[in-house]
Image (spheres, rainbow, N blue to C red):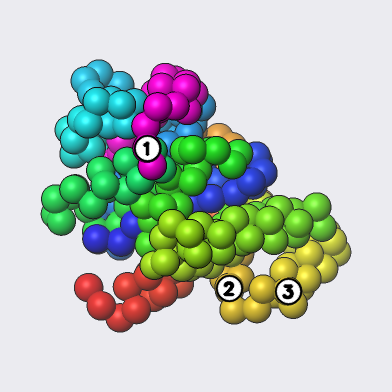
Amino acid sequence: MRVVAIASRKGGSGKTTSAVSLAAAFGAAGRRALVVDLDPQGSASAWLRAPTDGPGLFEVFTEGAQLVEAIRKTGAGGVSIVPASPKLAGIEKALSDEVGPERIFAEAIAALPKDAADVVLIDSPPSLGLLSVSALVAARFVVVPTEATPLALGGVADLLKTVESVRRRLNRSLEVAGVLVCRADHRRNLTAESIGLLREHHGALVLRAVVRESVRVAEAPSHGLTLEEYDPHGDAAEDYRAAARELGGRIWKGKA
């Protein structure tokens, strides 16, 4: 089982879209994908129409509930989800007296049965706090989604610095699987320039796959369907499949 945090310090970077769409692409390729919605806004949970009954992530953090008990099925092939809870917004206050609270989630992930999923994709919050750090501590790999704009370049650099800090202090196994450019409008010269700068600064960390801008990406969540279901032959779905193949080669490194 591979654990991958989808992390960004900036909202609107394609973080949730990437978590859901990569999960659907892995599912379509025959891998069992589990999305863990660690963002209190719950966008991935709403997109996949996840039921929120029973114990959830808040109880995992505060009461020692088993993460496996919070897994819910979705209508997307090969994809399950641990839905978010609005109560997660108060998690730092709830755990203010805990020692090492950033390790609680990692322990919950480690306790998952090996057959729970082939790949776990953690949709982390877009701000640096306990939940986002918990995602990085629990993960073996990080994927950094970003827009193809000059302003986004600084956000990628800041996030990579955070990853390095977590790797030094809390999770020596953490590795950047790739920087994924999303919402790329190739009709704009600025897009090519921004991608070029990303490759210049971060080299092979930037995936070859680039997700093209598509109105279908905005439409799919309102229908409760992944891109694989809603527009499987569209540009964005094809691009996410290419990204999943590329990431798969990195996170499994030729191993099942």
User: Magenta stretch?
Assistant: 79-100
Alpha carbon separation for disc pair 1 and 3: 37 Å
Whether residue 25 can be seen here: no
Q: Nearer the viewer, residue 173 or 152?
A: 173
Expressed as whole percent of the image width and height from the top left, the position of residue 235 reads 56, 57
Q: Residue type at mark 2: give it.
A: Leu
Q: Is residue 82 above or below residue 213?
A: above
Q: Is residue 93 magenta?
A: yes
Question: Relative to residue 221, is residue 218 drawn left or right?
Answer: right
Expressed as whole percent of the image width and height from the top left, the position of residue 48 reads 38, 33
Expressed as whole percent of the image width and height from the top left, the position of residue 112 reads 19, 48
- Splitting the image into 4 quarters, where does residue 12 fall? top right
Q: Nearer the viewer, mark 1 or mark 3?
A: 1
Q: Which residue is mark 3?
A: 201
Residue at screen point 25% across, 18% down: 53
Residue furthest to the right in view is 189
Q: Is residue 35 above or below residue 244?
A: above
Q: Nearer the viewer, mark 1 or mark 2?
A: 1
* Of callouts 1 and 2, the N-terminal one: 1
Q: Secondary structure at mark 3?
A: helix
Question: Relative to residue 76, is residue 165 drawn left or right?
Answer: right
Q: Residue type at mark 1: give it.
A: Val
Q: Is residue 157 magenta?
A: no
Q: Are marks 1 and 3 in contact (CB under 8 Å)?
A: no
Using a 10 Å C-alpha cutoff, classify the residue at mark 1 as few (fewer than 14 neighbours), some (14 to 19) or many (20 or more): few
Q: Which mark is residue 99?
A: 1
